[in-house]
Amino acid sequence: MKKIFLISFTDNGQALAEKITCGLNQKEMEAQAFRCGNPLSLSAFASQGFRKAGALIFVGAMGIAIRAIAPHVVSKVKDPAVVVIDEKGNNAISVLSGHLGGGNELTQLVAEITGANPVITTATDVQGVFAIDLWTKKNNCKILRPDRIKVISAALLSGEKVDFVSDYEISGQVPKNVELRVLRGQKEDKVESCTSEVCFGERANVLVSIDKTKIENAKEKCLVAVPQIAYLGVGCRKGTTEHAIEECFEEFMRKSGISADAICLVCSIDLKKDEEGLISFCKKHELEFKTFSAEQLSAVEGEFSGSNFVQKITGVDNVCERSAICGSGGIIVNRKMAKNGVTMAIATAHVNLDWRL
């Protein structure tokens, strides 16, 4: 989780906020407490919190929190977690983004630190029913068609069956009323075709895949969960523009069988850590950027599309493929493509999906 911001309004509330902050920091979570008006006003706290924090904790009345966050609420996919705890520490209440934002989990943690009663109101938690949004978060999957979350949850809460079609094996016991069909195990030679007609009937359904064609065929009829396992390795000449990188990326992804939504990290050599065009590209696509030294890249074993010119400039024969493997710890699935002085490759990490939450 990103930073956690806390705000209090009284001396008692401030003491409790400091206790919670200390407890969270001891668990290696980055928490920061504010007293309302010093230095931030309530509106500034909410505004900055929604832009910069992964969670907000209000130590005070529920009404204060609701009024403060109301202008900033967008969707369960984008909103930070919001938790309210009264200043005596009696009740800790999950208010917003209980699953995807981690609000319910944070509420339990705050209750553990303070001795408060955790108040969780999400229907799937109350009824003990499988929660698809929590499952995707725990298994590091990106949700396409998040509007389908409520469809899946409503079906399960009503005792209806849900078709769960996955390209990957899922460990653990299949939840009640979930009917799993695995299209592909760990062997790439066992891929079945998947059209909306083949995979899905009229029931509420889920597809777990990074396959671009399967996702395109199914996304209008189901919730798509895309495992974040693709690592984009990038090499480029000094001074390469964002536009040149974007053009290469668009062509590269058109030729790739992998959905761009599966990409979780852009990787390169440390010589590119301040490359403005590459940094701007990552910001545009909301992707993290990580670099590796020439020594780290050279240590990667395997066969790569080497270049004497690249070796002379960087100290390593290939940047894009080697950095993608360094980032993922996996295997190359899309080898080097070059355009506009930019090279790209994709490697994927091993998938470990689990029903257990």
Image (cartoon, helix red, strand yellow):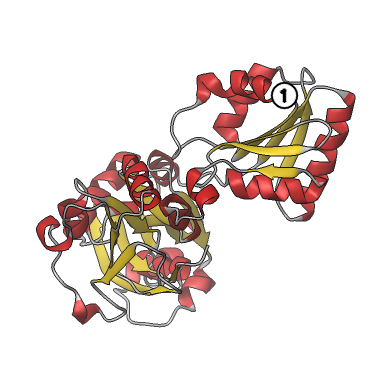
Any part of residue 241 in sight: no
In the rendered image, residue 83, in percent from the top left (x then y), is placed at: 65, 36
Q: How many marks?
A: 1
Nearest the eye: 321 or 190: 190
Any part of residue 327 in sight: yes
Nearest the eye: 227 or 298: 227
Q: Quadrant of residue 229?
A: bottom left
Residue 40 vs 204, above or below: the answer is above
User: Label 1: how many residues lie within 10 Å, few (<14), some (14-19) or many (20+)?
Assistant: some
Nearest the eye: 330 or 80: 80
Secondary element at tag 1: loop
Residue, x 74% and y 46% (percent of image)? 111
In the rendered image, residue 165, in percent from the top left (x then y), is placed at: 26, 64
Q: Quadrant of residue 199?
A: bottom left
Residue 41 vs 221, above or below: the answer is above
Q: Which residue is mark 1?
A: 61
In the rendered image, residue 223, in percent from the top left (x then y), is placed at: 29, 50
Residue, x 55% and y 43% (percent of image)? 98
In the rendered image, residue 259, in percent from the top left (x then y), is placed at: 26, 55
Q: Please state which amino acid type lies under the numbered disc 1.
A: Ala
**In the rendered view, does 254 fall on the left or right side of 163?**
left
Q: Quadrant of residue 330?
A: bottom left
